[in-house]
Image (cartoon, rainbow, N blue to C red):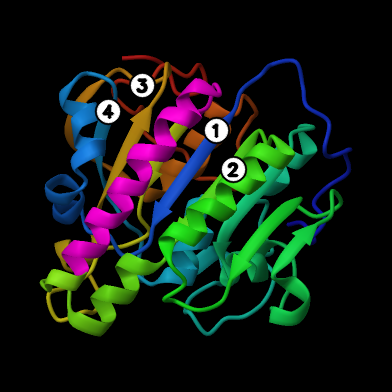
């Protein structure tokens, strides 16, 4: 267990290893929606420049518990983040903590619940919207607090952080897909349109990130039912995509589902440091060339 400042170690000093990662979480995007409507991202898969996996989310398939799963690799029954109403700092060692302790620069453009889990809780919009403190796990953060905050603005926030602070690990978390799903349903034109909009943003951002030397993963926390719900056990709620872009990934489509608990240790491997002792052992991910996971 760790406190909000992580374990001992100096943050904000880049190592010579040069491992750099951008993780994009498209909140509420179910697997079928990703494969049908992320046209640019699917183009990268089709043209042999990206890998696509199917991920089965942890339960409950709710946002805050799954943010914790994605970033700490621990299940809700162990980490205690069991519902969206649990508002406190995480007691686990997150990817942000591990990166900071490895001497890497961390940044996030994300929903304010991410700040509440890893930097400051409860979130105060007047104080915590922008955070720049190298003693915190998320050293440079831009946190929004309204679900309809435009994804166009969110990715602009992320680009400001990237270009200004040159982070080794940048976490980008958008909310418009989830918001549209709740308001209009997961079978609505608004839900579909929100996916297509973020795809057009990624079509502009991803080439720049590749040129800057980043490995990129794109995934979701959970899916969405036609009626606009999630939290349960149906495939629409639990099945999400994971796209891998960069040298560690062998391009292709991998149909065998992988557990969501594998994503945090995957990020640790991509950033060239060891996972935390509490991250769950995970199966070998096919098509992945990272020593900690093996190669297939």
Callout 1: helix, strand or loop? strand
Q: Earlier in the sequence, mark 2 or mark 1?
A: 1
Q: Distance between the residues labelled 3 and 2?
A: 19 Å
Rendered view: 167 above or below 1: above
Q: Mark 1 points at which residue?
A: 21
User: Crowding at label 4, few (<14), some or many (≥20) Cα neighbours within 10 Å?
Assistant: many
Residues at discs 1 and 4 in contact (Cβ within 8 Å)? no
Rendered view: 108 above or below 15: below
Q: How far apart are marks 2 and 4 (CA)?
A: 20 Å
Q: Which of marks 3 and 1 is nearer the N terminus?
A: 1
In magenta segment, residue 213: yes
Q: Is the magenta stretch mostly helix, strand or loop?
A: helix
The residue segment tinted magenta is: 191-215
User: Crowding at label 2, few (<14), some or many (≥20) Cα neighbours within 10 Å?
Assistant: many
Q: Mark 4 points at which residue?
A: 51
Whether residue 239 is visible to the viewer of this picture, yes or no, is: no
In magenta segment, residue 207: yes
Callout 3: helix, strand or loop? loop
Residue in the picture at 76% in, 50% down: 139
User: Residue 249: which disc?
Assistant: 3
Residues at discs 2 and 1 in contact (Cβ within 8 Å)? yes
Q: Earlier in the sequence, mark 3 or mark 2?
A: 2
Can you give x and y, in whole percent of width and height, for residue 187 in the image?
Answer: 10, 71
Residue in the picture at 57% in, 49% down: 158
Residue in the picture at 69% in, 43% down: 106
Q: Earlier in the sequence, mark 1 or mark 4?
A: 1
Residues at discs 3 and 4 in contact (Cβ within 8 Å)? yes
Q: Earlier in the sequence, mark 3 or mark 4?
A: 4
Q: Name the residue under label 2.
A: 170
């Amino acid at each position: 267990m760790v406190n909000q400042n992580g374990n001992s170690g100096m943050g904000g000093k880049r190592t010579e290893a040069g491992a750099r990662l951008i993780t994009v979480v498209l909140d509420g995007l179910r697997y079928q929606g990703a494969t049908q409507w992320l046209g640019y991202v699917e183009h990268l898969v089709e043209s042999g420049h990206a890998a696509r996996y199917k991920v089965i989310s942890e339960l409950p398939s709710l946002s805050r518990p799954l943010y914790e799963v994605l970033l700490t690799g621990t299940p809700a029954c162990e980490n205690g983040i069991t519902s969206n109403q649990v508002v406190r700092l995480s007691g686990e060692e997150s990817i942000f903590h591990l990166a900071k302790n490895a001497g890497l620069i961390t940044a996030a453009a994300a929903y304010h619940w991410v700040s509440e889990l890893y930097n400051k809780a409860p979130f105060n919009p007047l104080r915590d919207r922008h955070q720049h403190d190298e003693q915190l796990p998320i050293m440079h953060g831009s946190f929004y607090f309204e679900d309809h905050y435009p994804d166009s603005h969110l990715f602009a926030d992320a680009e400001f952080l990237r270009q200004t602070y040159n982070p080794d690990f940048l976490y980008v978390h958008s909310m418009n897909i989830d918001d549209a799903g709740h308001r209009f349903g997961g079978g609505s034109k608004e839900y579909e349109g929100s996916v297509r909009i973020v795809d057009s943003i990624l079509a502009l951002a991803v080439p720049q990130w590749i040129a800057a030397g980043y490995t990129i993963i794109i995934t979701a926390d959970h899916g969405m039912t036609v009626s606009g719900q999630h939290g349960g056990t149906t495939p629409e709620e639990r099945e999400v995509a994971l796209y891998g872009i960069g040298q560690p990934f062998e391009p292709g489509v991998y149909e065998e589902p992988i557990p969501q608990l594998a994503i945090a240790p995957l990020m640790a491997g991509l950033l060239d440091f060891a996972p935390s002792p509490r991250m769950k052992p995970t199966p070998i991910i096919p098509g992945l060339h990272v020593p900690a996971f093996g190669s297939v």
